[in-house]
Structures are given as C-alpha cells and as structure tokens.
Amino acid sequence: MGSRIALMTKDSSSISNADLVFDAKHIWHPYSSMREPLPVYPIVSAEGVRLRLADGRLLVDGMSSWWAAIHGYNHPELNAAANQQISAMSHVMFGGVTHKPAIDLARLLLEISPTNLTKVFFSDSGSVAVEIAIKMALQFWHALGEPSKSKLLTIRSGYHGDTFQAMSVCDPITGMHEIFSNTLPKQFFAPAPQCNFDEQWNDSDLAAMEKIIRSHHQEIAAVILEPIVQGAGGMHFYHPNYLKGVRQLCDQHNILLIADEIATGFGRTGKMFACEHADVQPDILCLGKALTGGYISLAATLANDRVSDAIADGRDNGGIMMHGPTYMANPLACSIAIASTELLMNSPWVERISHIESVLGKLFTPIAAFSRVRSVRVFGAIGVVELHEPVDVALAQRAFVDRGAWIRPFGRLIYLMPPYIIDDEDLALLVNAIESYLSCT
Ligand SMILES: *Cc1c(COP(=O)(O)O)cnc(C)c1O
C-alpha cells in the first residue's frame, strides 16, 4: 500500500494514462459497464460555462452537470459561501442540534416555494428526497387510520430517482430499472400526458388518470409526478391543464399530490417552480439538483400543515417523521444553497431563461429538417432533439467534444440544459455541434 499512497498526487490537473486505465478498471460511472466501459473525459477544472479537459481543451457545458450548475462553475460568490462555512464548521449532526445555515435556508425555501408549504425536511440527494416524500404520504394515511391507502399513482415517462421506492414510480420501460421489477412495489401508472405545453388543451388527456383514481382511490396515498416537464424519462413538456386536473382529482378523491421539482426547480422552466405554470400547490414538494447551484449534494422535501399535522398527531409512531440521515442539513451544503438561491433571485433569471428559450428555438429550426430527427422542442432553458433511433453515445460524445461542446445524449435524445449565464455565441456552439454530428453520421 505504501507505494500506492506515495504515487498519489494532490494535483488534480495532471491525469496520466495510468490514472485512466485505473478508472476504467476500478470505478463505476453512472449506468456504466465494468466490462466495456464507455470512454470518460478527464476534467481538471471548470469556470463559467467552460469545462477544462486534462489536455487543456475547453468545452462549453450544455448539461449544467445534470440540471444543477445553473450559475456556471467556480462562481466567486458560491466559493466565498463555501469557504466561509468551512472555516466555521463543515458539518455537525442535526439530531438535537440546529444551526443558522439550516434555519436561513428553510426560511428562504418556504418564502420562494408555493405558499401553502410550511415544513422542510433536509436530506442528501434527490432520490432520498423522493423516498421521504413517499414516507410522508404513507405516514399521513397511516396516522389518519387509513393504512390501506398505501399505493402511489404516477404517469408514464416519469423519472424520480434510483432508490427503490423512487424506482417504483419511474417509467417501467425508459426508467432503466426493469430488472428490479420483481422486487419493486407495484404502483399505478396512467399514460403519459399527450397534450404538449403549447397545444390546444383536450380534456380527454385526463380520462385515463381519472379512471384509475375513481376505481382505486381507496388504495392510493398520493399521486407523484414531475410538474410540466418530464425529465430523464423522456423530456416531454405537457399541458398545465393536465396538472390542474390532477390537483382537482386529488382533492375530490382524497389523495395527496407530490410534486417532484428536483429537475424543474429554481427557474429552469421560466418559473421559479414548474407548478406555477398551472398555479398548482402540491401537498409535498421535492427539491434537489440546482438547490446548491451544482456545488454539493443537498435535497429537501417540503410539506404543508395538513401533511405535517396528521403525521404529528399519528399515534402508533408517536407523531414522529421516520427518517434522519447522517448528513441531514449539512451546514456546508445549506450555506452554499442559500448563496445560490440568493444569487438566482438577485439575477435577471426570468429574462435570461426566456432569452435562452428564444435563441434555442431559432437555432433548432434547421435541426428539425434532418431526416434522422423526429422532433425538436424547447421549453425554458431546455432544448431537446429527439431522433428516430437511439444515439451511439460514445460516438456522439466524441463528435461533440471535438467541436468544443459537452453534451451527454441518452436513448433517442440529445438535449441541452445549459447554465443560465450562457451567452448566444456559446449556445450557437452547442447547437452547431449537434448539427455537425447529425450531418456527418
Ligand atoms: C435527478 C432526479 C431525481 C434523483 O435525484 P438524485 O440526486 O440523482 O438522487 C429525482 N427526480 C427527478 C425529477 C430528477 O430529475
């Protein structure tokens, strides 16, 4: 071991070939194979919208590191918040303890989120925030003496994370979790909404959802969905009336509504939270990803008084919300989240998002003409190119990198969700990279 330790370096800017061979042999990447690992690109630093590869090349980031880095990288204000908090205390347990970063962040989140929400549960990651939301819903009905209301209802093409309850409400096909189907709890699935955000609304879109609710409401604890934008399950933008209708059905049939805004939260769709497009207030709200501006993992599950009061009055569990992660409300993460959220609120984010939307819309027009392209769509700071066939990820990624773009396709989708600070030139670079990939393959 001694020699191996001696070989280690604290200089993250030098990555050798031996390092990459070690990586391929020993480190799993997201949804990767150890037998045939796809190429990974060594990144040594990042600033603004640019990622720096070990060989010095710069890539314009089209992904915001999966919805998270909304202000770009290496931001002086976020760095300052992190440094300041680290020198005070990086972490302390949350059991029997409290601290200013948690209090201030909770206050801030309750201020900007739908007005009915009054309680905050902090956790480590989006999937866990979803688990907690589901626990809240189950504990709610248990406390009210209706334990048979223990199933979830969701819509196809959704994505809610990689832990087990979260997997159980991902799309059974595109959710990438098929092999676990025997172990997963069986939930109810309505078809994905068909009416797109900007199309004429048709009431029949809700018919299947209504039918399931009418026949099974005694078993259903909550509807969980991603409001307006379905992310990793297919990148669809659906009609606000669908969400409104679901809220009404939930009210009529005594079902809770969980909004998973882990991807859509913090401005990405042009509203602070996507629920606002439909003027809908969920009973439980999940936040993550952009919560810390992409600096560090943190998530939150917010609830209204109806949910928290029922749980608090529950007799069999002493009124306790049954969860408590080790790193709950990590002060470092909370401080960065406060800085990131304030940075967002003090920026002209509404104008920026609508500008990105209109620029992407124009730049995408020629892309729609390619025969391999099934459709293009833009909503807020999200641009999607859907192909007829799945993309060869290794090939596409290489083509993008050769053109100075960081874009990570999946399935039949090539999509962009850049940091909000991106300028027109860099947006054009990203779209040109997609265009030249499409024209030469
Ligand atoms: C990414 C995502 C999750 C899971 O978050 P993790 O931090 O990856 O666990 C859950 N729901 C939605 C909508 C997401 O986009």
Image (cartoon, rainbow, N blue to C red):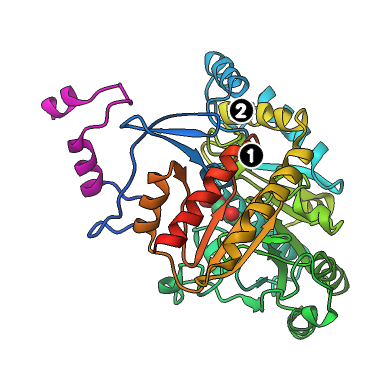
Q: In this view, does 313 lie above or below 233?
A: above
Q: In this view, does 130 lie to the left or right of 36?
A: right
Residue at image mark 1: 424
* Residue located 46% across and 55% down the image: 436
* Residue located 77% across and 85% down the image: 211
Q: Position of residue 180 (x, y in %)?
A: 43, 71
Q: Give residue 320's mark.
A: none
Prevailing secondary structure class for the magenta stretch in the rendered image: helix
Decide: few, some or many residues near mark 1? Use Cα within 10 Å; few <14, some 14-19, many ≥20: some
Q: Which quadrant, please, contains the N terminus?
A: top left
Q: Where is residue 253 in the image (x, y as percent from the top left)?
A: 84, 75
- Queried on whether the Cβ of the residue with tag 1 lies below 8 angstroms from ligand 1, the answer reads no
Residue type pointed to by label 1: Asp
- Foreground pick, 169 / 183: 169
SS type, badge 2 = helix
- Foreground pick, 256 / 266: 266
* Residue located 64% across and 34% down the image: 421
| Quarter of the image where one finds residue 348 | top right
Q: Earlier in the sequence, mark 1 or mark 2?
A: 2
Q: Is residue 149 above or below residue 382?
A: below
Q: Where is residue 153 in the image (x, y as percent from the top left)?
A: 68, 72
SS type, badge 1 = helix
Residue type pointed to by label 2: Ile
Residue 320 shows up from this direction: no
| Quarter of the image where one finds residue 377 | bottom right
Q: Is residue 242 above or below residue 95?
A: below
Residue at image mark 2: 336
> Is 2 covered by the magenta stretch?
yes
Q: What range is drawn magenta here? A: 1-26
Residue 348 shows up from this direction: yes
| Quarter of the image where one finds residue 396 | bottom left
